[in-house]
Image (cartoon, rainbow, N blue to C red):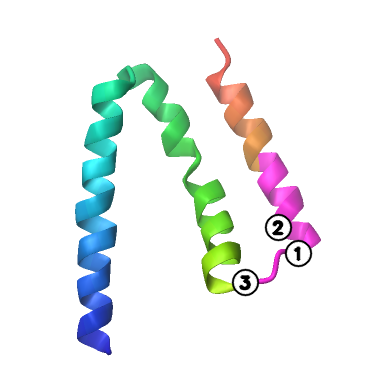
Amino acid sequence: MAWGSVALQTVVGAFISYLTWMWMLRHYPATQMSTFTFLTPVFALVFGVVLLGEPLTGQLVVALAGVAVGIVLVSKR
């Protein structure tokens, strides 16, 4: 089980995420990439709820809204 977890982290965490990042750099200007970087906590929360069945509490929704507002403020010119 432990080796399977290490293998999964290697394939998904390192290889696929690296390929996705390189694809995004090729298709989007580097200045727009910061927006995708800021979305990491949003994706982590969504995947935790959808894939792992974690509870979505009101506090998490408020925190997610705060992150979204922060992304919008930082991304404005």
Q: Please name the amino acid that badge 2 sits on.
A: Leu
In magenta segment, residue 56: yes
Image spot of residue 15 (x, y percent): 19, 54
- Name the outermost residue toward the top: 77
Q: Please name the amino acid that badge 1 sits on.
A: Thr
Contact (CB < 8 A) between labels 1 and 2?
yes
Q: Which residue is mark 2?
A: 60
Q: 10 Å neighbourhood of mark 1: few (<14), some, or many (≥20)?
A: few
Q: Is residue 31 left or right of residue 38?
A: left
Q: Is residue 59 left or right of residue 32?
A: right
Q: Residue at x 24, y 52 (%)?
A: 16
Q: Which residue is mark 3?
A: 54
Look at the numbered disc 3 and give the secondary structure of its residue. Answer: loop
Q: Residue at x 22, y 56 (%)?
A: 14
Specify the quadrant of the image occupied by residue 74: top right
Q: Residue at x 70, y 57 (%)?
A: 60
Cα gap from disc 1 to disc 2, whole angstroms: 5 Å
Q: Please name the amino acid that badge 3 sits on.
A: Glu
Image quadrant holding the N terminus, namely: bottom left
Look at the numbered disc 1 and give the secondary structure of its residue. Answer: loop
Q: Name the main secondary structure of what is drawn in magenta.
A: helix
Disc sitting over residue 57 in the figure: 1
Image spot of residue 52 (x, y percent): 53, 72
Q: 10 Å neighbourhood of mark 3: few (<14), some, or many (≥20)?
A: few
Above or below: residue 2 compared with residue 16: below
Above or below: residue 24 compared with residue 61: above
Cα gap from disc 3 to disc 2, whole angstroms: 11 Å
Residue range highlighted in magenta: 54-66
Q: Is residue 38 left or right of residue 31?
A: right
